[in-house]
Image: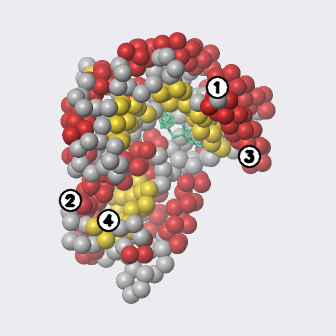
């Protein structure tokens, strides 16, 4: 496989960005070369996202855009969350695709590539399994300063709108000693700004090591310059976390705490496991304990049966809490999820208006905070 040129494009979240890096590290170790130009590549890989319809549409059109590159068509591999979501349906919809490889199978990607090149057959790997931990230790990081370090894979929360538990599988925690080893390895290369990554970091557990303990242990690694983490779930984020943040200089004073909606009725239908009151109490606690702590959030507008009143509640919550940043999404019905069984009854133009109103409000808040 020596010298085969690989182009990899990433779609999706930080978890996918880290997986893309893992794939690059593994393929480099096998002798592949990385290229920035799809036209120069023998192999084109898309690491895909299924979280909203829009994310998938971008990938389908990306596949459509790979024109025949002369006499030899590149090998096309669809990896990541869409691969898991659609499995062999991808071959039907896009016959030019050679490999479909779900997130749990990226540790086998080099084998799939060899097989696809040799046999010219379409290859599918979409099991639900734990990946080999050594994939995290190739030492390849895109950035010279900052790295994401995965602490858990998958998610068990089953928020009713969310496809992640179906495409990333059940929650699995990485061994804490291996996480610490990976961080030490990165720091020894000078990559000393680390973000711990999981769909719900607050639920991390490896024997007696819970998230706050892991954070404390990581913070003590010599040479580490900065430590942060993503994402905290309001239902099991604890005051103890805020105390450790406040006491530990190396930990960034930054919390991403997705609220999703300001209406208890909607939160319940989303299966989020907290109320608005509890969320606000948590924010007060955080701001009381972590001096000058930054706070960001995610919000979905237009969830099924979200009324104007529900939306107004979200609007006033955003005005009240004054987030430093808010990522606002229009609800998108996802296959297999519980909410896919509800009628997607908020009209597109209403979703659009609610989205625009919240964006405008958040922009004003962000602007007022910078002065
Ligand atoms: N595990 C993280 C991130 C999950 S995906 C968490 O729980 O916060 C990132 C964001 O995408 C979510 O916070 C949510 O706001 C949004 N999202 C997820 N599914 C969605 C859907 N079906 N439609 C619109 N937005 C969605
Ligand atoms: Fe999706 Fe909820 Fe898990 Fe986040 S916590 S990944 S929103 S199911
Ligand atoms: Fe991330 Fe999208 Fe998968 S948000 S976990 S890449 S569905």
Q: Is mark 2 within 8 Å of ligand 3?
A: no
Disc 3 is placed on an element classified as: helix
Q: Residues within 10 Å of mark 2 (few under 14, many from 20)?
A: few
Q: Mark 2 points at which residue?
A: 29
- Contact (Cβ within 8 Å) of mark 1 with mark 4: no
- In the rendered image, the quadrant that contains the C terminus is top right
Distance between mark 1 and mark 3 Cα atoms = 22 Å
Disc 1 is placed on an element classified as: loop
Q: Mark 4 points at which residue?
A: 34
Identify which residue is drawn at 30% across, 37% down.
192
Residue 51 visible here: yes
- In the rendered image, the quadrant that contains the N terminus is bottom left
Of the image marks 4 and 3, the number of the one nearer the N terminus = 4
Q: Which colour scheme is used?
A: secondary structure
Disc 2 is placed on an element classified as: helix
Q: Name the residue under label 1.
A: 322
Q: How crowded is mark 3: few (under 14 residues within 10 Å), some or many (20 or more)?
A: some
Which numbered disc, 4 or 3, marks the residue closer to the eye? 4
Which numbered disc, 2 or 1, marks the residue closer to the eye? 1
Q: Mark 3 points at which residue?
A: 352
Q: Does the residue labelled 1 lie within 8 Å of ligand 1?
A: no
Identify which residue is drawn at 71% across, 34% down.
364
Distance between mark 2 and mark 3 Cα atoms = 46 Å
What is the number of callouts on the image?
4
- Contact (Cβ within 8 Å) of mark 1 with mark 3: no
Of the image marks 2 and 1, the number of the one nearer the N terminus = 2
Distance between mark 4 and mark 3 Cα atoms = 39 Å
Of the image marks 1 and 3, the number of the one nearer the N terminus = 1
Q: Residues within 10 Å of mark 4 (few under 14, many from 20)?
A: some
């Amino acid at each position: 496989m020596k010298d085969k040129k690989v182009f990899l494009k990433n779609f999706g979240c930080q978890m996918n960005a880290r997986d893309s890096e893992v794939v690059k590290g593994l393929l480099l170790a096998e002798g592949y070369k990385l290229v920035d130009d799809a036209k120069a590549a023998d192999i084109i890989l898309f690491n895909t996202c299924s979280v909203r319809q829009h994310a998938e549409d971008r990938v389908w059109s990306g596949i459509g855009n790979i024109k025949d590159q002369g006499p030899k068509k590149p090998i096309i591999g669809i990896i990541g969350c869409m691969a898991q979501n659609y499995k062999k349906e991808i071959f039907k919809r896009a016959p030019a695709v050679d490999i479909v490889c779900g997130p749990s199978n990226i540790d086998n990607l080099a084998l799939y590539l060899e097989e696809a090149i040799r046999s010219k057959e379409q290859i599918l790997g979409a099991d639900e399994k734990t990946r080999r931990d050594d994939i995290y230790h190739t030492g390849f990081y895109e950035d010279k300063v900052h790295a994401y370090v995965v602490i858990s894979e998958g998610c068990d929360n089953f928020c009713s709108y969310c496809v992640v538990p179906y495409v990333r599988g059940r929650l699995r925690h990485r061994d804490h000693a291996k996480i610490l080893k990976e961080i030490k390895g990165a720091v020894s290369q000078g990559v000393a700004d680390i973000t711990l990554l999981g769909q719900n970091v607050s639920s991390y557990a490896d024997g007696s090591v819970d998230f706050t303990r892991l954070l404390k242990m990581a913070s003590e690694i010599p040479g580490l310059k900065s430590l942060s983490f993503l994402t905290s779930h309001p239902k099991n984020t604890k005051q103890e976390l805020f105390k450790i943040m406040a006491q530990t200089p190396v930990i960034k004073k930054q919390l991403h705490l997705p609220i999703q909606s300001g209406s208890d009725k909607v939160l319940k239908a989303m299966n989020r496991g907290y109320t608005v009151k509890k969320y606000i109490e948590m924010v007060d606690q955080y701001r009381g304990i972590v001096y000058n702590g930054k706070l960001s959030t995610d919000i979905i507008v237009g969830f099924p049966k979200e009324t104007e009143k529900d939306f107004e509640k979200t609007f006033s919550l955003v005005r009240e809490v004054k987030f430093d940043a808010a990522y606002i999404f229009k609800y998108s019905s996802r296959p297999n999820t519980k909410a896919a069984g509800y009628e997607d009854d908020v009209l597109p133009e209403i979703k659009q208006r609610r989205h625009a109103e919240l964006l405008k409000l958040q922009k004003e808040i962000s602007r007022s905070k910078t002065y």
